[in-house]
Image (tube, grey):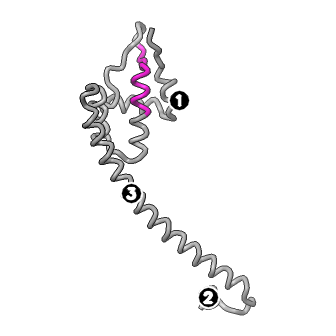
Amino acid sequence: MSEYYTPGEVAERFGLSLDTLRYYEREGLLTEVERSTSGHRRYRAADVELLGLVRCLRDTGMPIARLRGFAELVRAGDSTIPGRLEVLREHAERVAEQMVELRRTQEAIEHKIAYYEGVLAVRDASPADAGTPAEAAR
């Protein structure tokens, strides 16, 4: 017998709210979620595995529409592996570009931190009558 997971178990596993889980279903990221005989939603192991990948890609900024397309490729079977590979390569390239930009931003922030630490060091090393920090830094 297949192993099933409740919405609560899946939400907890991925740190999602139940609303987010339902949103992913409405957006077509998870489709054909089974129901128990009592009508409660239940997820198969394959649903959980796909959701793990969806979360990973979403956390890296992949848009929902692109995620939906990727999920459709996964559900369509192994013949779509070349298409999935293309989607992942394109996304990896976008993530690499974002990382370069983030590194530039981080360097600018580190430069400002060093500047302000220098201002404080000069101010702390100067006599009390040295004036304002800006004057002391000159």
Q: Disc count in the image?
A: 3
Q: Residue 12: which numbered mark, if any?
A: 1
- Residue placed farthest to the right in the image? 127
Q: Position of residue 76 (x, y in %)?
A: 26, 26
| Labels 1 & 2 near each other (Cβ < 8 A) | no
Q: Residue at x 33, y 47 (%)?
A: 91
Residue linked to disc 2: 137
For the residues carrying marks 3 and 2, which lies nearer the camera in this image? 3
Q: Amino acid at mark 2?
A: Ala
Q: Residue 114: which numbered mark, if any?
A: none
The magenta span reads: 40-52
> Is label 2 in a helix, a strand or a loop?
helix
Please, is residue 116 above or below residue 40 in the view?
below
Q: Residue 98: which numbered mark, if any?
A: 3
Instruction: Give the camera-side residue of 76 and 60.
Output: 76
Q: Sequence-wise, which precedes: disc 1 or disc 3? A: 1
CA neighbours of label 3 inside 10 A, class few (<14), some (14 to 19), many (20+): some
For the residues carrying marks 1 and 3, which lies nearer the camera in this image? 3
- The reply to whether the magenta stretch includes residue 49 is yes
Q: Residue at x 44, y 21 (%)?
A: 45
Instruction: Give the camera-side residue of 130 and 54.
Output: 54
Q: Where the N terminus falls, by quadrant?
A: top left
> Is label 1 in a helix, a strand or a loop?
helix
- The reply to whether the magenta stretch includes residue 106 is no
Please, is residue 130 above or below residue 53 in the view?
below
Q: Position of residue 58 (x, y in %)?
A: 39, 42
Q: Is residue 129 left or right of residue 86?
A: right
Q: CA distance from mark 1 to mark 3?
A: 29 Å
Q: CA distance from mark 3 to mark 2?
A: 35 Å
